[in-house]
Amino acid sequence: MSDPTRPATPTRIHAGGIRVKYYKSMFLLNIFITAGFAAGTPAQAQQWPAKPVRVIIPFPPGASTNDILGRALAQRLSEALGQQFVVDNRPGVGGNLGSEMGAKAVPDGYTLLIGTNGPIAISPHIYKALGYDPLRDLAPVTLYAMVPYAIIVNAAVKATNLNELIALAKSSPGKLLYASSGNGGTPHLCMEMFKRQMGVDITHVPYKGGAPATIDLLGGQVQLFCPGLPPVLPHIKSGRLRAIAITMPKRTPYLPEVQTAAEQGRPQLDVNSWVGLLAPAKTPPAIIDKLHAAITRIMATPEMKTYVSSNGAEPLAMGPKAFGAFLRNESAKWGQVAKAANLRID
């Protein structure tokens, strides 16, 4: 009778005079290990998140719509996925510093980035030594808010629509001054787009942020500005500033009476800002899909829709594939504007 405690006798196979030995138990073990390794990524994704997740916001706390909406999303992801999504503000160089940190993080799903068009779609075309390539180094997860922009003027400017503004600019070359929140930001490139597409000569006056630019626009020191709508809406409602055109394909519910640039015969003037969640490239697709599914559920709630709208943005939930195509289009668009304006920052 065989002894059950004794190791199994190896099976011997003779082939061409060469004796090959293997153990059935080892063979089965190898199959098990191989199968387990192949299934490792889905298994990790099912377990994710197993610890707190860092959400980098590349702007100061409370200083922008990006921070406000980024924090709101992080809080709701914590509730939806059962782990803390911890906001980590990393401001600097127009959002480039924090965006680089997000792009270079370990792609394990435990570092995410709140992205917007400045550091993601514009910076690669104007900064000579940018330390990351957004299209190569980041994976799109979900685009979840769109912020409408508008060309606005001081109420004393004798123009109520785009054609009147263009005529006024052409009648006094170089005399109209346009503000921006700083070199290379979306308001700057918006007016550069306007300037070249409409064939007008207007003069750039950069400021250190949107707030001082708005103050001087209200005071009449500058005449034009192309900002995101939320901070300037009260001044438009009061009549101190006038919205000339919404620079999105459709009208915004915040100023339903103001025509879009497209409605005024200028469809090529297409400018907005957006807020989306990105992950380091090579983050497992199953984790990205899990994140997108959670965000889609969050954005479908009346509470989140109301919160996003109350901050002057339009809620949506664009998936990874569509978001990726959107990013490529945005990058190409702003690359053309930066090249035409010869914008380079060392």
Image (cartoon, grey):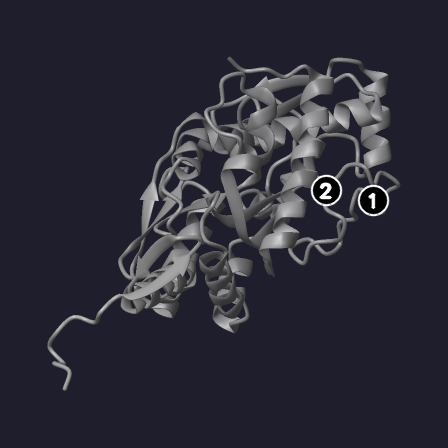
Element carrying mark 2: loop
Residue 102, x across and y down, in percent: 41, 39
Residue 266, x across and y down, in percent: 84, 38
Residue 265, x across and y down, in percent: 88, 41
**Amino acid beneath label 1:** Ala
Q: Can residue 113 be seen in the rendering of this structure?
A: yes
Q: How far is mark 1 from mark 2, CA to CA?
A: 8 Å
Residue 178 or residue 89, whichever sits in front: 89
Residue 327 or residue 161, whichever sits in front: 327
Residue 240 or residue 192, whichever sits in front: 192
Residue 193, x across and y down, in percent: 73, 28
Q: Quadrant of residue 243?
A: top right
Residue designated by label 2: 247
Tell whether 134 sits left or right of 6: right
**Amino acid beneath label 2:** Thr
Residue 297 or residue 165, whichever sits in front: 297
Label 2 environment density (alpha carbons within 10 Å; few <14, some 14–19, many ≥20): many
Q: Can residue 76 be seen in the rendering of this structure?
A: no
Tell whether 191 sits left or right of 299: right
Q: Residue at x 75, y 54 (%)?
A: 257
Element carrying mark 1: loop
* Image mark for residue 262: 1
What quarter of the picture does the N terminus occupy? bottom left
